Amino acid sequence: MTFERSIRQRIDQVPAPLLFPVYDWKQLYEFFPLRASYAPHTLDFIRHGESEGNANGLVTGSWDAPLTQRGVEQARILSHSIHAFYDIAYCSVLSRSKETLRLAAEDRVETTFTFSDQRINERSLGVLEGKSRRDLSQYALGDLSFAPAGGESYLDLTRRVLSFLVDLFDTANRHGIGVRVLVSTHAGPLRVLAGVLDGITEPREVLAREFSNARLYSRCIAEVSWPRFLPETEYLNGR
């Protein structure tokens, strides 16, 4: 079965976006460190191709903006960078992430399991969505608790992404030794993932990271420690 066909069969059958659990902070803290069974897992991350929001300089967030024609071509070119086989693949439930994964894998990549997971959606940016992009001082200062009206904070996003990582490692460990995983996601989740996997200590550095559209970022991971950039009170009080 081709990866493209697997994606069509599995992703298109997802009945609702809220399928996977978001654990509370206390639960999450008890799960860490995450360890690969016997051999490191290879995690390949990609940000979706250019979306209409990106092209027009707009805040996209949870708005389900489709790929531009340029984004479609970027996703197809990405097929030359990814591997020919993945044990597990994930995308968000947003169409730009799904379509990037489908186009990148079309006719040349195979996988065993493919999942669409809302926990790696871009963060909701509330009233800012659809507005022109601008720098916000709260992000420049590394304020993880700041959320635009009606939107999510980076703490909310971090909790989602950590929940995703917990289940990713559980799935990978049950699947086999040295599992190869492909994840199609967005800039916000990629910032958090890089902060966690690279052991970044400063929230400002986490929030300042940039990720290009349709580019591959790879990590070979044996163990994942609790994020060094997180305030301790967030998990001690069990929220």
Image (cartoon, rainbow, N blue to C red):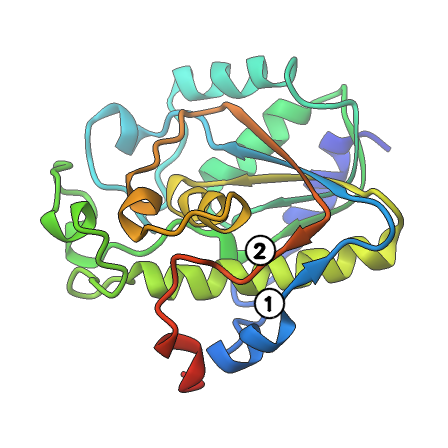
Residue sitting at 76 percent across and 19 percent down? Answer: 108
The residue type indicated by label 2 comes to Asp
Of labels 1 and 2, earlier in sequence is 1
100, 87: nearer the viewer: 87
**Residue 107 placement (x, y as % from top left):** 75, 20
Give the residue furthest to the bottom. 237
Labels in figure, total: 2
Report which quarter residue 174 is drawn in: bottom right
Q: Which residue is mark 1?
A: 20
Q: Amino acid at mark 1?
A: Phe
Residue 105 location (% of width, % of height): 68, 26
**Quadrant in which the C terminus is drawn:** bottom left
* Residue 10 shows in the view: yes
Q: Residues within 10 Å of mark 2 (few under 14, many from 20)?
A: many
Q: Position of residue 179 (x, y in %)?
A: 81, 43
Circles 1 and 2, Cβ within 8 Å, touching? The answer is yes
Vertical order, 157 against 11 (above or below): below
Cα separation, mark 1 vs mark 2, equals 7 Å
Using the image, determine if residue 24 lies above or below residue 154: below
Q: Quadrant of the N terminus?
A: top right
Q: Secondary structure at mark 2?
A: loop
- Residue 96 in the image: x percent, y percent? 46, 36
Q: Which residue is pictured at 36% across the width and 29% down the height?
A: 51
Quarter of the image holding residue 58? top left
Q: Seen in the image, is 200 located left or right of residue 61?
A: right
Residue located beneath label 2 in the image: 117
In-image side of 167 versus 190 (left or right): right
